[in-house]
Amino acid sequence: MTVTAVPLRPIQKGTLSKLWLGIIVLLLAAGAFAWHATARTIAMNGTSEDFLAWNGGQAGVVTTDSGLQYQVLETGDDAGSPGQGAGVIVNYEGRLIDGTVFDSGEQQGLPLDQVVPGWSEGIQLMTRGARYRFWLPPELGYGENPPPGSPITADSVMVFDVDLIDFITREQMMQIQMQQMGLQGGPGGPPPGAAPPPGALPPAPGQ
């Protein structure tokens, strides 16, 4: 039986170089992906420091001097930011790095002097209409003392997606508080049962 050999068409030198270049690029890309996947696995299963060190190197993530990490998801109106002690109205979701959601709220009114330090610092970076993602290291969150009964464990990194809807200054907050004291029958104030002052923030969660 005769076997007919089918010769391959000769490959030009330039084509061969491009072929090897393509193979090298694919190998490098595969190596980079494998390294990234391994680094992420180590970060997700390591300590909070391991995770924050890895996360701080991701695209768009900024780390402040305090250790707070944030990423701008949507920019706001550039018309000023909440100052220290301001009152804010926000939509938010809080979760652990494994994706477990432990809290959320819509149009929640919160005074910044009554939230954990990472929240207060992060929201002061925002403007109205902005949406940010925050990663709070334990020392800027609950540290070793998370709320009893919550899925948050000691020394957990907390992740928050926050929409800043509106805010008022500390001075405006104080004026509202004084008006509310008057509405509750304080000296010289309106009688109990009167309508609340316009623009008053809704109560913080749990209040």
Image: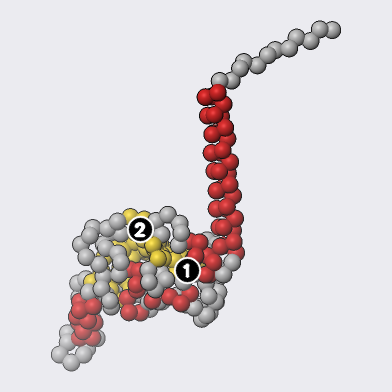
Q: Is residue 136 left or right of residue 195?
A: right
Q: Quadrant of the C terminus?
A: bottom left
What residue is at 23 percent from the left and 58 percent from the top? 77
Residue picked out by circle 1: 158
Residue picked out by circle 2: 72
Mark 2 and mark 1 lie on one chain; the one further toward the N terminus is 2
Q: Tell me the SS state at disc 2.
A: strand
Residue 39 image-quadrant placement: bottom right
Q: Is residue 165 left or right of residue 95?
A: left
Q: Nearer the viewer, residue 48 or 162?
A: 48
Residue 160 image-quadrant placement: bottom left
Q: Amino acid at mark 2?
A: Val
What distance separates the C-alpha of mark 2 from that of mark 1?
17 Å
Q: Position of residue 105 (x, y in %)?
A: 40, 66
Q: Residues within 10 Å of mark 1 (few under 14, many from 20)?
A: many
Q: Tell me the SS state at disc 1.
A: strand
Q: Residues within 10 Å of mark 2 (few under 14, many from 20)?
A: some
